[in-house]
Image (tube, helix red, strand yellow):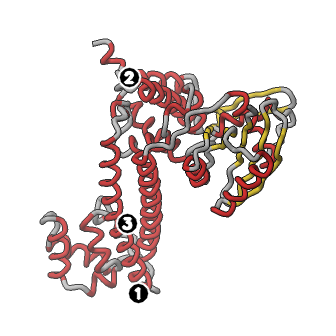
Amino acid sequence: MNHYFLGIDIAKTNHVASLIGADGSVVIRAIKFKNSNEGYTKLLNTIQNKLNDLSNINIAMEATGHYWLSLYSALVDDGFNVSVYNPYQIKSYRGAYNNRKQKNDIIDSIIIADYLRVFGMKDSKLPQEDLMALKQFTRFRSNIVENVSSIKVQVIGLLDKVFPEYKDFFCDVFGVTSKQILLNCPTPDDIIRISTTKLANLLSKNSRGKFGKDDALNMKEVAKSSFGIKFTTDACSFEIKQLINQVIFLESQLEDVDKQISELYNKLDSHLLSVPGIGIKLAPTILAEIGDINNFDKPSKLIAFAGVDPSENQSGNKLSTNNKLSKRGSPYLRHAIYTASLVAISNEPKLRSYYDKKINEGKHHFVALAGISRKLLTIIYYILKEDRDYISYDEKHN
């Protein structure tokens, strides 16, 4: 019985597939097909016209973004054996297979097929639905946070122009009380026009009595002598009110999505909360971005996936590394790990000791922090692999 290996190079709109035999010879080169029902039918018909029997075909593809999911689902539903590989697995094989290190869709599809032929099938079950949903929610949350931050920058810029003294009234310009003031009277002219009683009531109601009439009178006095611009103030007032409404809406969305994330994360006992620096906001993102830890056969693969491994430079036959991060892989995971590293050096003695050692050696803060990130990812790798909590240095020696 002849066995065949189909490699599929995944793209957003059009995929490319090549079929090779058990001896590595190319049977079908470059079937180009759309990521659609019609494209899927074209793929199967092209192969069937050549082989008649499709039962002896093993299939492989790279997990490129989310674009592979529909095709993978269709193939599995039709009973095919499908392996899904991390792109970095294929990248290392490409160099050995293709000495000129050429990269195009046709060559890549053949390389993927040959990788499957040489290394065999990989169990590539779709991540459980909860994990896939968690990834969608955490990325959505990240986008909301970015939008809120961007809008807040716009508000601060407008206040700097029209009411530069405003920031001195509140420790948090976007706190509950301040947002209500900005919704009702964001410019000096608005503050002057509103009655002292109404302004005092706004302040008192939203601050639970912390602010009152004296604060209202103070705001009015400052507004009268504000150094802000005296033109287009009505336009600035309108824009600030609209932007604050957007902030309030997006913050309510954040509350809703956080509830969804919390419910999903609590179903998945990942032990990540035991790791120094990782709290309830970061753990879901880290777990969702890593997915199945069995996709990584050693910590260095996970570190590379996060993009916190040193980049490489090649000149002639010489290969060297530098202090710059490769920044490949998941930016969401990289940002979460970086944030966790900042916290970890404050509450984990071993990590703090490593950080201080690098700083004393003359390393830049970010270089030392990258080292902490790699150590954290190594810790995460083993607790996920071994399904256990992290044991700190202090706990081990008590």
Q: Quadrant of residue 192?
A: bottom left
Residue 205 seen in render? yes
Residue 364 seen in render? no
- Give the CA distance from mark 1 to mark 2: 55 Å
Q: Tag 2: Cα neighbours inside 10 Å, few (<14), some, or many (≥20)? A: some
| Percent position of residue 148, x then y | 42, 63
Q: For marks 2 and 3, give the one nearer the viewer.
A: 3
Tell which of 201 and 30 is nearer to you: 30
* SS for callout 3: helix
Above or below: residue 235 compared with residue 305: below
Q: Amino acid at mark 1?
A: Asp
**Which of the labelled discs sits on residue 250, or is there none?**
3
Which residue carries the number 1 mark? Answer: 234
* SS for callout 1: helix
Which residue carries the number 2 mark? Answer: 349
Using residue 134 as the reference point, say whether residue 86 is left or right of it: right
**Which quarter of the image is occupied by the N terminus?**
top right
| Percent position of residue 11, x then y | 68, 54
Q: Tell me the residue at 24%/67% (across/down).
A: 177
Using residue 297 as the reference point, say whether residue 342 is left or right of it: left
Tell which of 198 and 283 is nearer to you: 283
Q: Quadrant of residue 295?
A: top right
- Give the CA distance from mark 1 to mark 3: 25 Å
**Which quarter of the image is occupied by the C terminus?**
top left
Using residue 301 as the reference point, say whether residue 384 is left or right of it: left
